[in-house]
Amino acid sequence: MRLPDREIRKAISQALSGMTVVSPFGGAELDITVHDYRLPENKTEYVLMINQWADLDRETKCPENTWNCGITLDIVTVFPNEQGSRLLADIIQEEVWNRTKSLSIDHFYNEEQTMRSPDDLETMTPTQNIYRKLIQYEFKLIEK
């Protein structure tokens, strides 16, 4: 039996590898990096893979190993003082959504994939504004 967690992370990392977006604040091209739980140093825009889960599907009577599983991506943009807006996070979210809407996951058939975006998160401090957008993925995977 193969667990799907690392294969899901690998598929997302590959889909988002080399991702760039154009900043709405000055037009610079920004490299967006993907990280597995650990916060990157000196980055003001990035994607974190968080809250991963997997359950063996006990409702099917098929002999295959079928998994119901998911992962959440956290898109983070950080601005100094009272600058910025959600706009950059929106642009990154759109690019992530387009690159991951149909993932191919090694060693599994991707029987079903759903994506949703819950409410945005904002944190305002005296020194920075942090805008976050989440994308939650759910998969039904069958081991090959």
Image (cartoon, helix red, strand yellow):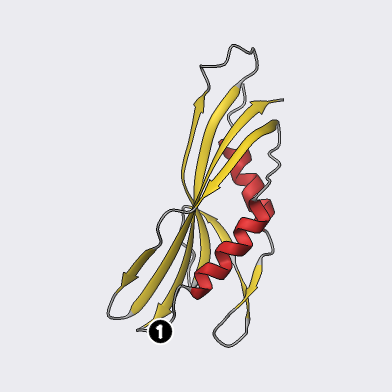
In this picture, is 108 found above or below 74? above
Specify the quadrant of the image occupied by residue 3.
top right
User: In the picture provided, is 46 more to the left or to the right than 2?
Assistant: left
The residue depicted at 68 percent of the width and 46 percent of the height is: 102
Label 1: state its secondary structure: loop
Residue 134 spot, x, y in % from top left:
46, 56
**Around disc 1, counting alpha carbons within 10 Å, would you say few (fewer than 14), some (14 to 19), or many (20 or more)?**
few
Q: Is residue 59 above or below residue 71?
A: above
Q: Disc 1 marks which residue? A: 83
- Quadrant containing the N terminus is top right
Q: Is residue 48 left or right of residue 97?
A: left
Provide residue 56's location: percent of width, then percent of height: 52, 23
Which amino acid, by three-letter code, is at mark 1? Gln
112 above or below 34? above
Quarter location, residue 66: top right
In the image, residue 67 lies at what x, y percent? Answer: 56, 27
Left or right: residue 66 compared with residue 50? right
The foreground one among 34 and 108 is 108
In depth, the one of 52 and 40 nearer the eye is 52
The quarter of the picture where the C terminus appears is top right
The residue lying at 43 percent from left, 73 percent from top is 78
* Residue sitting at the far bottom: 26
Name the residue at 50% across, 69% down.
89
| 78 to the left or right of 47 | left
Query: Between 52 and 61, which is closer to the camera in this rendering?
Result: 61
